[in-house]
Amino acid sequence: MQASQKQFASQISDSDSAANLLREDLHDLDHEESWVLYLNNCNRPLDKLMITVGSISSTIVDIRRIVKQALLCNATRIILFHNHPSGNPLPSKADIAETEKLKKACDLFDISLIDHIIIGDDCFYSFADESEKSFRQ
């Protein structure tokens, strides 16, 4: 799914503005999905892409596909999103491990993983806000 900048709000300034951009795509689903928001150096969205569709309790983070699309759209920053159909946005151990793997892969290509946001029922969890890992640049 290629999207033009005209479809996006202006610059992403914080986790609230990022979460609001994907909340509609991930809210009230009965399965997990992972999406990525691709950004330029000024945190302006270049593209958003659904990466995977999972089950009721998990989804795969396709690191190769995420990095490939970042390179294709010249993104220098990305935000990973996924949802928890249970409504509880707290990350699992698998969520934390996959986030670290993606961060390491992005680092190899000078792409910054600036956040991983998990959407729940009318709330979200931001790795950057909660300092689960040091994503802030």
Image (cartoon, rainbow, N blue to C red):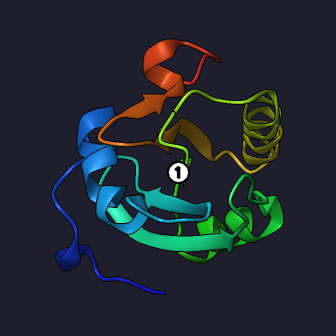
Position in image of residue 96 (x %, y %) = 74, 29
Q: Is residue 103 left or right of residue 34?
A: right
Q: Is residue 95 left or right of residue 89?
A: right
Residue 137 appears in view: no
Q: 77 and 100: which one is in front?
A: 100
Callout 1: helix, strand or loop?
strand
Q: Is residue 135 left or right of residue 129?
A: right
- Is residue 19 depicted above or below 127 in this figure? below
Q: 55 and 17: which one is in front?
A: 55
Based on the displayed image, in which of its 4 quarters is residue 60 positioned?
A: bottom right
Reading the image, the residue beneath label 1 is 81
Q: Residue at x 62, y 15 (%)?
A: 132
Direction top: furthest residue: 131
- Is residue 117 depicted above or below 81 in this figure? above
- Give the residue type that dot 1 points to: Phe
Position in image of residue 48 (x %, y %) = 44, 70
Based on the displayed image, in which of its 4 quarters is residue 16 positioned?
A: top left
Position in image of residue 53 (x %, y %) = 67, 72
Q: Is residue 46 left or right of residue 98?
A: left
Q: 129 and 114: which one is in front?
A: 129
Based on the displayed image, in which of its 4 quarters is residue 63 positioned?
A: bottom right
Q: 59 and 62: which one is in front?
A: 59
